């Protein structure tokens, strides 16, 4: 999609997929609105977008879990630009740990940011799109929103909810053919979200293979803004995993825990219990990529650790 001159709002814009989406839209000349909690990281992201060629940048610090803050964001965009062409609801946080081990405040905040935040965005963006009778709202979900994964209950619940929300909104907005409600599900992506996560599991998380770059996912996101029938699953591996979960549950249930320990955490990097960036932003940890390294190298390290603790 050519987003030149469009007003594109992205939540979670200061890091990872959100930052990559802003940069790619900027290179096409879009007017980019950057939303996240931390002011300093947002201003740095806006500087990069301006250098990349953005028509303009607008920094609006906000916690998407706060409905009034989201309302203020949308109001500020309309005051500045008079319209809103595309919104990418991407803000998200992660917590690792057994359900009973994750503190209630942390568990609830994951749901508040990922799921309630998506509802808040929809609540204030959709009336604008419907008045305009055109525009796009796209939700960034996850393959984890289609399956179960041990020690990630809060994230799993939130992403199943985001997928359900997107489907509901598609049904409710079928009457306007030029209002697009989209949903995409990335697999493993090399972003800082794993390092920034709340963690009560004892070892640092990492993206499971195959690992995509944030820029590749950003390109797929921008394509989806105008293509309702584009593939929701952004990797073929997602389809394999989903097939196992739904068609072969007796196999999936036996394999998911050991495979998760092998490919989705780093057994060589222990960590004390931490709330990560779930309750408060950790701006120093924000970046485009997470520096996870090669997936195969990570798996080999885990195998050596398992064999020789």
Image (spheres, rainbow, N blue to C red):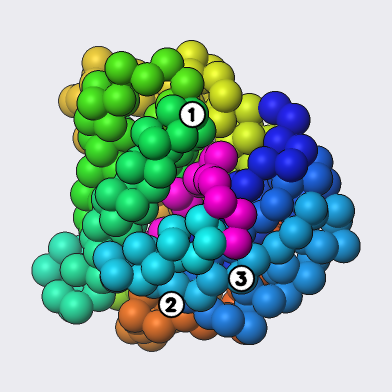
Q: Residue at x 37, y 64 (%)?
A: 70
**Res. 277 mark:** 2
Mark 3 → mark 2, Cα distance in angstroms: 20 Å
Quick check: can you spot residue 15?
no
Position of the N terminus by quadrant: top right
The tag earlier along the polypeptide, 1 or 3, is 3
Q: Residue at x 72, y 75 (%)?
A: 44
Front-lying residue, 202 or 43: 43
Q: Nearer the viewer, mark 1 or mark 3?
A: 1
Q: Nearer the viewer, mark 3 or mark 2?
A: 3
In the image, is 172 to the left or to the right of 211? left
Q: Circle 1 — which element?
A: loop
Q: Residue at x 40, y 43 (%)?
A: 128
Q: Quadrant of residue 100?
A: bottom left
- State the image coordinates of residue 198 (x, y, percent, origin top left): 37, 74
In the image, is 257 to the left or to the right of 228? left
Front-lying residue, 289 or 123: 123
Asked whether the beta carbons under mark 1 and mark 2 sit within 8 Å of each other, the answer is no
Front-lying residue, 199 or 36: 36
Residue 94 is covered by the magenta coloring: yes
The tag earlier along the polypeptide, 1 or 2, is 1
Q: Quadrant of residue 273?
A: bottom left
The tag earlier along the polypeptide, 3 or 2, is 3
Q: Which residue is mark 3?
A: 59
Mark 1 → mark 3, Cα distance in angstroms: 24 Å
**Res. 134 mark:** 1
Residue 290 is covered by the magenta coloring: no
- State the image coordinates of residue 114 (x, y, percent, origin top left): 33, 57
Q: Residue at x 56, y 30 (%)?
A: 225
């Amino acid at each position: 999609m050519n987003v030149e001159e469009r007003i594109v709002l992205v939540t979670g814009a200061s890091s990872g997929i959100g930052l990559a989406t802003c940069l790619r839209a900027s290179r096409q000349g879009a007017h980019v609105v950057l939303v996240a909690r931390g002011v300093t990281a947002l201003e740095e992201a806006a500087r990069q977008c301006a250098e990349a060629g953005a028509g303009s940048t607008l920094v609006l610090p906000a916690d998407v879990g706060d409905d009034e803050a989201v309302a203020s964001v949308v109001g500020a965009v309309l005051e500045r630009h008079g319209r809103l062409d595309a919104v990418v609801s991407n803000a998200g946080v992660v917590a690792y740990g057994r359900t009973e081990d994750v503190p209630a405040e942390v568990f609830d905040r994951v749901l508040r940011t990922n799921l309630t935040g998506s509802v808040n965005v929809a609540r204030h963006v959709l009336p604008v799109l419907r008045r305009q009778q055109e525009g796009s709202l796209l939700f960034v979900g996850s393959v984890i929103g289609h399956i179960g994964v041990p020690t990630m209950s809060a994230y799993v619940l939130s992403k199943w909810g985001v997928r359900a929300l997107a489907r509901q909104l598609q049904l409710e907005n079928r009457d306007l053919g030029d209002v697009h409600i989209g949903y995409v599900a990335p697999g493993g992506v090399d972003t800082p979200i794993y390092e920034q996560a709340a963690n009560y599991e004892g070892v640092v998380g990492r993206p499971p293979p195959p690992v995509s770059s944030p820029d590749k996912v950003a390109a797929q996101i921008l394509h989806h803004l105008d293509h309702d029938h584009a593939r929701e699953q952004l990797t073929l591996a997602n389809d394999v995993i989903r097939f196992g979960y739904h068609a072969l549950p007796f196999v999936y249930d036996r394999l998911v825990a050991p495979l998760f320990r092998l490919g989705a955490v780093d057994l060589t990097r222990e960590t004390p219990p931490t709330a990560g960036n779930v309750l408060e932003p950790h701006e120093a940890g924000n970046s485009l990529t997470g520096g996870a390294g090669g997936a195969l190298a990570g798996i080999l390290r885990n195998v050596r650790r398992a064999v020789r603790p």
